[in-house]
Image (spheres, rainbow, N blue to C red):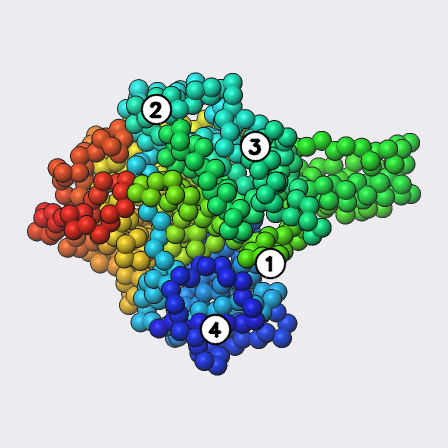
């Protein structure tokens, strides 16, 4: 049962698409206060578990920390971070009382889940203008499925999007892409996609191509397709300010960009330098921006990834002006005097820099220089703090507006919707461009509702072992919020990966719908063919292709039935007190469990089995070992070049022969692994169309 409680005048996010009955009085759980903003308070029992929050830090059980839904461009995903790229305000309390809560509120919202007081759940936000959905059910799993039904069907990608993809920030020319394609094809490592980061554009301008490097882009797209490789370009949120750039000029002429309070177009610096943001919350502007994807689809492109759409801001003219004033004041103070003309320095131009994208990690190095005077060092702190705050400034987010149904809405009031509506712009445009065809689309920033238009990747992670575990724990939480097509940058985006880290991460990525190796410029090259004994990479990625019939089938069943692709063990074994505590193993589909190795130098790991299961290992010689393990704890050995999987008692799954691309997979002749005498219902379609309900898409295979 679901009830909707309305407070104040909520902004319509369109996250919920079903009609929900209005609740009477106050919610049956907790206490709501609206005198000073909004605050929901609930006293938890000691054993209560809190699930949800989608793309959030730390554990599967969210108890014990404070999380803030505030879409944030932050590449350092350490344990102390409270905000990441997404805002997914859905939680389930499981315990003496079991219920779900969705706080449909598009601005910053704080989830204090036993942080201030260990027994207290407190959800608060600045304005008491929101919709609160309270969901009751038989179990957390039941509550999640009810929630999934009211927010609408999850995005369904084309089947090729379940293949392996290679990406790197720094591929610039045709030869760079050809080198990647040949590196995989010549070494017979399967590959379906190569991603195009920002360097393919002309001066970082959206929907353009570098004139020198891609003079005949449609022919190049077809060249790659002839090898069964699709190019997937990035689209950023900021539109470069440049006379003669038609998208900029059209946006200005039609008032399609976000505006300052005085009606002028808001300016923020991102990769191209000064940019404007398309007002994707405005219906007309969203249609206009979405239709620009046609520029690339007309040249043969079939998929995209949206980035920098929190939206990320390196700095604004207002922020630079304030910094100059602070600098001038410091240079004129009695704590600093070296003969510099303070007025001239403070009015000088500050050059554009890409450093703002990643914060100011190196700022502290200079705080003690220039004077031995303690007062001078102290007075520098506000200045250094201002430099650090230039990027993604809360003040900048308060300085621009959207026009929604004729009303001006300040951006910070709806900040969490930008990535959602940018991706919605593309999703709606694809329906106009080719309504019968599926396009690949995923985004960095998101809000619940965006799951209907695209998936997400988990952002700019690092080549850290801890991020394999963070990747794993996010998967079911994101599924609960509707995001089924998801995955992390395998091997890590920032920092230098290692061969063993990449292999272990790939062994998890084998099972995630989005399987992509992606790295930052300046890091170690981490394409799979860059390492010794590359046959190990050929084998691990080959296992992915062998499993695609099963993975695709389970994905489609989850999407079409508003179900989960990944589930916590507790959702399947709710009466097993040990299973309820497990956070580093996940149920996959209805037949399997995954338990990846995520520890450096480990030769295996401990697992807990809530029931008898068949322990399967895909071995590097192409064979498969199968061993039945009883209920309980086991230590299982897993070599670097092996892929482990557990199949539930009485279940079986289909396997194909490995292929170099998804299009080459033979799904008519499959073999089975698991328990003999069982059967599996396979979902399989053409992978491109949208006739999902055809009975011919299902067939039963007996083992």
Residue shown at the point (12%, 49%) measured from the top left: 700
Between the C-alphas of marks 2 and 1, the distance is 45 Å
Is tag 2's residue or tag 1's residue first in the polypeptide sequence?
A: 2
Is tag 4's residue or tag 3's residue first in the polypeptide sequence?
A: 4
- Regarding residue 382, the answer to whether it shows in the image is yes
In the picture provided, is 426 more to the left or to the right than 336?
A: left
Residue 5 numbered mark, or none: 4
Give the percent coordinates (x, y) of residue 270: 61, 37
Which image quadrant for residue 46?
Answer: bottom left
Q: Considering the numbered disc 1 on the image, is that residue within a helix, a strand or a loop?
A: strand
Residue shown at the point (27%, 49%) measured from the top left: 556
In the picture provided, is 88 more to the left or to the right than 576?
A: right
Residue 407 numbered mark, or none: 1
- Regarding residue 642, the answer to whether it shows in the image is no
Closer to the camera: disc 3 or disc 2? 3
> Which residue has dot 3 on it?
246
**Count of numbered marks:** 4
Q: Considering the numbered disc 2 on the image, is that residue within a helix, a strand or a loop?
A: helix
Closer to the camera: disc 4 or disc 3? 3
Give the percent coordinates (x, y) of residue 137: 33, 71
Nearer-the-camera pick, 302 or 565: 302
Between the C-alphas of marks 3 and 2, the distance is 26 Å
Between the C-alphas of marks 1 and 4, the distance is 24 Å
Is tag 3's residue or tag 1's residue first in the polypeptide sequence?
A: 3
Label 3 crowding class (10 Å Cα cut-off): few <14, some 14-19, many 20+? few
Closer to the camera: disc 4 or disc 2? 2
Which image quadrant for residue 637?
Answer: top left
């Amino acid at each position: 049962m679901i009830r909707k409680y309305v407070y104040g005048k909520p902004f319509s996010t369109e996250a919920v698409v079903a009609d929900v009955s209005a609740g009477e009085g106050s919610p049956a759980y907790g206490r709501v206060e609206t005198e000073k903003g909004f605050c929901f308070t609930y006293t938890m029992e000691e054993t209560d578990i809190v699930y949800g929050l989608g793309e959030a830090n730390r554990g599967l059980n969210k108890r014990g920390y404070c999380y803030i839904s505030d879409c944030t461009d932050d590449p350092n995903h350490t344990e102390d971070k409270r905000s990441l790229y997404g805002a997914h305000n859905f939680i389930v309390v499981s315990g003496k009382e079991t219920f779900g809560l969705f706080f449909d509120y598009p601005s910053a919202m704080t989830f204090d889940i036993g942080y201030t007081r260990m027994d207290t759940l407190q959800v608060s936000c600045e304005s008491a203008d929101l919709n609160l959905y309270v969901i009751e059910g038989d179990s957390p799993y039941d509550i999640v499925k009810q929630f999934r039904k009211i927010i609408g069907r999850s995005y369904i990608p084309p089947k090729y999007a379940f293949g392996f993809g290679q990406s790197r920030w720094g591929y610039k020319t045709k030869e760079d892409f050809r080198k990647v394609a040949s590196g995989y094809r010549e070494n017979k490592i399967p590959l379906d996609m190569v991603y195009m980061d920002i360097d393919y554009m002309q001066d970082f301008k959206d929907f353009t191509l570098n004139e020198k490097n891609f003079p005949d882009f449609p022919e190049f797209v077809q060249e790659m397709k002839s090898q069964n490789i699709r190019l997937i370009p990035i689209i950023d949120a900021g539109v470069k300010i440049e006379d003669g750039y038609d998208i900029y000029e059209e946006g200005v002429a039609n008032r399609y960009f976000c505006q300052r309070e005085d009606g002028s177009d808001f300016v923020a610096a991102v990769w191209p330098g000064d940019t404007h943001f398309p007002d994707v919350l405005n219906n007309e502007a969203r249609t206009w921006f979405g239709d620009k994807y046609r520029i690339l689809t007309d040249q043969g492109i079939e998929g995209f990834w949206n980035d920098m759409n929190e939206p990320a801001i390196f700095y604004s003219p207002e922020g630079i002006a304030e910094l100059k004033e602070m600098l001038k004041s410091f240079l004129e103070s009695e704590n600093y005097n070296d003969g510099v003309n303070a007025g001239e320095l403070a009015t000088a131009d500050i050059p554009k820099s890409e450093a703002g994208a990643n914060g100011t990690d190196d700022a502290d190095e200079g705080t003690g220089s220039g004077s031995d005077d303690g007062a001078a060092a102290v007075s520098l702190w506000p200045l250094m703090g201002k430099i650090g705050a230039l990027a993604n400034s809360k003040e900048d987010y308060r300085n621009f507006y959207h026009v929604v149904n004729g009303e001006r809405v300040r951006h910070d009031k709806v900040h969490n919707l930008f990535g959602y509506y940018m991706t919605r712009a593309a999703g709606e445009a694809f329906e106009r461009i080719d309504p019968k065809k599926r396009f690949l689309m995923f985004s960095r920033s998101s809000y619940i509702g965006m799951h209907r238009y695209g998936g997400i990747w988990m952002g700019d992670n690092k080549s850290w072992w801890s991020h394999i575990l963070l990747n794993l724990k996010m998967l079911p939480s994101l599924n609960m919020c509707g995001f089924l097509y998801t995955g992390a940058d395998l091997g890590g985006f920032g920092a230098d990966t290692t061969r063993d880290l990449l292999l272990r991460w790939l062994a998890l990525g084998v099972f995630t719908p989005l399987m992509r190796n992606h790295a930052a410029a300046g890091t170690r090259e981490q394409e799979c063919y860059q390492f010794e004994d590359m046959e190990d990479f050929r084998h691990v990625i080959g296992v992915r292709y062998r499993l695609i019939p099963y993975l695709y089938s389970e994905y489609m069943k989850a999407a079409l039935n508003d179900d989960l692709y990944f589930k916590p063990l507790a959702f399947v074994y709710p009466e097993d007190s040990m299973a309820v505590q497990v956070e580093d193993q996940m149920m996959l589909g209805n037949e399997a469990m995954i338990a990846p190795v995520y520890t450096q130098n480990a030769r295996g790991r401990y697992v807990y089995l809530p029931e008898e299961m068949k322990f399967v290992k895909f071995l590097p010689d192409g064979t498969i070992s199968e061993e039945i393990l009883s209920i309980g704890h086991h230590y299982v050995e897993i070599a670097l070049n092996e892929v482990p999987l557990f199949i539930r008692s009485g279940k079986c799954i289909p396997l194909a022969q490995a292929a170099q691309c998804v299009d080459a997979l033979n799904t008519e002749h499959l073999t089975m692994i698991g328990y003999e005498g069982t059967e599996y219902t396979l979902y399989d379609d053409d992978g491109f169309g949208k006739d999902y309900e055809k009975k011919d898409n299902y067939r039963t295979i007996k083992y």
